[in-house]
């Protein structure tokens, strides 16, 4: 394939070039032999011109017709150009040798004219030769460029052919391998097809068996459906019962909550009663300070006052016992209700095993009921704490009574007692009701007037009574003391009028 793509040799054109070169050589020799006469010179010049034109025409035609010439052809063209240059030089030498002698003026003039004509023709020939030379050189360059381009195209075409050969060979090999693999896969698929046909036959037999089993299962399913309908009816009945029981429990829970709220109200009322009693104790202490001057004159009345104070104490104890009984009854009722609710919840748990959703709601209700027991315990602890505080206040009162008993002077006050009371007042929080109680104790120890109590905030502005302290046995407490907590107690008032002498007598009795 490479030999077929090689460029063909231009044999005909090379033969024409050889003929033109031989003609030029013959004409050059003839012109050299006939150079003795002017006519011969003119003929030679014309012949040379014609020969040069023929040769140039042949070379140009050859260059135009042979763009695919090789390097030896270009060398030949260059050799021809060199030969033409030599001929031109020889002609110039011959013309220079033909200068006319001075003895022949007419011949000289004719020869001069001929020489001038020859020189002009020679100049024209030189110009044409120069132009033709330039054109030949340009054509040679174009031929070389065309040759290089053709060689490049030839190389690229050759590379493409080789690449096509290699790719076609690889593709043929790959196709052969794929064909072998396809044959192998066809054989495997045929084997698999046989196996699948066998499997289909087996599956058909199994399908027939499955149809028979399905008919039997359909009968069983119909029986199961009837049983399922019965079980659903039973389940709906149980669910309705559980819903009704849940509603009943919810109502009981609401009633229990209402009872708990009532109990809290009762506890708050009891706290108000306790605070009012504490205020009374503070005011009794104030009364004791006011009655200290008349203590010596009221010894006879003390015995009479003792009985009244004992009755008052008994009344207080009876009230406390009644309140304790009420609290115990409330706690017992609450505990009984909680126990009843717990038993009911246990019964619901046993009944709600078949319904998980109802069980969850019942457990939630049980969890809501259980915190009430802890609240009851907290209330018991609060009652115990209040009792302890009452005991500490009684101790402070006894200490104050001892100090007053030792020091009969009304201007002397125990510094340690006042210091302890003031420190306790400062340590109590601002919103705590104990702060008000501590301030009342300080006012009773320091024997503040009503105006001083108004400034300290113990009395409301405008409620102070500007009167002299009583020196007789008349009672100072004609009504219940003022309290910062305006609550309605759960029991009727403890009393209306209290005798100061009886109160002081009872206080002194406790001191002794």
Image: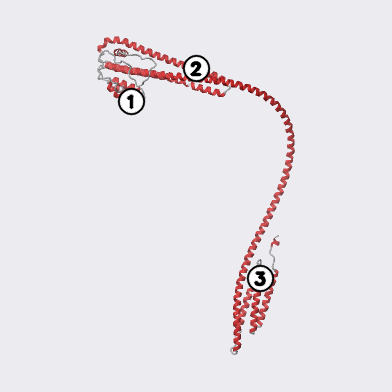
Q: Residues within 10 Å of mark 1 (few under 14, many from 20)?
A: few
Q: Residues within 10 Å of mark 2 (few under 14, many from 20)?
A: few
Return the residue at label 2.
Answer: 339
Return the residue at label 1.
Answer: 426
Contact between marks 2 and 3 (CB within 8 A): the answer is: no
Residue 394 image point, x, y percent: 34, 17
Mark toward the start of the polypeptide (3 vs 1): 3
Contact between marks 3 and 1 (CB within 8 A): the answer is: no
Mark toward the start of the polypeptide (2 vs 3): 3
Return the residue at label 3.
Answer: 61
Kindly state the secondary structure of the residue where label 3 is placed.
helix
Q: Quadrant of the N terminus?
A: bottom right
Closer to viewer: mark 2 or mark 3 = 3
Residue 15 image point, x, y percent: 70, 72
Q: Quadrant of the C terminus?
A: top left
Closer to viewer: mark 2 or mark 1 = 2
Kindly state the secondary structure of the residue where label 1 is placed.
helix
Q: Residue at x 70, y 28 (%)?
A: 214
Residue 82 quadrant: bottom right
Contact between marks 2 and 1 (CB within 8 A): the answer is: no
Closer to viewer: mark 3 or mark 1 = 3
Residue 288 image point, x, y percent: 29, 16
Q: In the rendered view, tell whether residue 332 sits above or below residue 62.
A: above
Kindly state the secondary structure of the residue where label 2 is placed.
helix
- The Cα–Cα distance between marks 2 and 3, rounded to whole angstroms, is 135 Å
Q: Is residue 228 left or right of residue 478?
A: right
């Amino acid at each position: 394939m490479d030999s077929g793509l090689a460029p063909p040799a231009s044999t005909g054109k090379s033969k024409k070039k050889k003929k033109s070169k031989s003609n030029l050589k013959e004409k050059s020799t003839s012109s050299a032999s006939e150079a003795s006469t002017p006519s011969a010179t003119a003929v030679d010049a014309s012949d040379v011109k014609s020969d040069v034109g023929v040769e140039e025409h042949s070379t140009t035609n050859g260059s135009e017709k042979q763009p695919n010439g090789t390097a030896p052809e270009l060398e030949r063209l260059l050799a021809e150009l060199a030969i033409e240059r030599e001929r031109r030089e020889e002609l110039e030498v011959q013309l220079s040798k033909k200068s006319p002698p001075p003895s022949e003026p007419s011949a000289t003039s004719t020869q001069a004219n001929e020489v001038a004509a020859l020189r002009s023709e020679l100049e024209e020939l030189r110009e044409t030769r120069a132009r033709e030379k330039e054109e030949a050189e340009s054509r040679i360059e174009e031929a070389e460029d065309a040759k290089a381009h053709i060689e490049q195209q030839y190389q690229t075409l050759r590379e493409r052919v080789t690449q096509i050969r290699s790719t076609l060979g690889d593709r043929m090999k790959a196709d052969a391998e794929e064909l072998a693999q396809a044959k192998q896969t066809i054989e495997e698929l045929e084997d698999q097809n046989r196996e699948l046909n066998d499997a289909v036959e087996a599956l058909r037999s199994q399908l027939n068996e499955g149809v028979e089993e399905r008919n039997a299962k359909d009968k069983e399913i119909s029986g199961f459906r009837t049983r399922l309908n019965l079980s659903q009816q039973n389940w709906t009945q149980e669910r309705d019962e559980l819903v009704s029981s849940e509603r009943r429990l919810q109502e009981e829970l609401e009633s229990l909550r209402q009872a708990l709220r009532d109990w809290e109200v009762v506890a708050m009322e009891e706290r108000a009663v306790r605070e009012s009693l504490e205020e009374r104790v503070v005011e009794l202490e104030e009364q004791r300070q006011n009655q200290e001057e008349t203590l010596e004159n009221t010894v006879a009345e003390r015995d009479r006052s003792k009985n009244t104070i004992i009755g008052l104490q008994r009344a207080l104890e009876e009230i406390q016992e009644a309140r304790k009984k009420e609290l115990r009854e409330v706690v017992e009722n609450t505990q009984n209700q909680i126990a009843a609710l717990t038993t009911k919840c246990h019964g619901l748990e046993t009944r709600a095993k078949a319904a998980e959703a109802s069980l969850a709601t019942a457990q939630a209700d049980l969890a809501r009921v259980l915190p009430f027991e802890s609240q009851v315990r907290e209330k018991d602890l609060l009652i115990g704490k209040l009792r302890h505080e009452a005991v500490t206040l009684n101790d402070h009162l006894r200490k104050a009574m001892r100090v007053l008993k030792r020091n009969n002077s009304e201007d002397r006050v125990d510094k340690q007692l006042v210091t302890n009371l003031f420190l306790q007042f400062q340590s109590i929080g601002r919103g705590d009701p104990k702060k008000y109680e501590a301030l009342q104790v300080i006012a009773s120890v320091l024997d503040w007037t009503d105006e001083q109590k108004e400034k300290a905030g113990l009395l409301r502005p405008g409620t102070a009574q500007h009167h002299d302290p009583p020196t007789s046995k008349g009672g100072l407490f004609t009504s219940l003391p003022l309290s910062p907590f305006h609550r309605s107690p759960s029991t009727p008032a403890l009393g209306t009028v209290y005798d100061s002498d009886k109160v002081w007598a009872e206080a002194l009795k406790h001191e002794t």
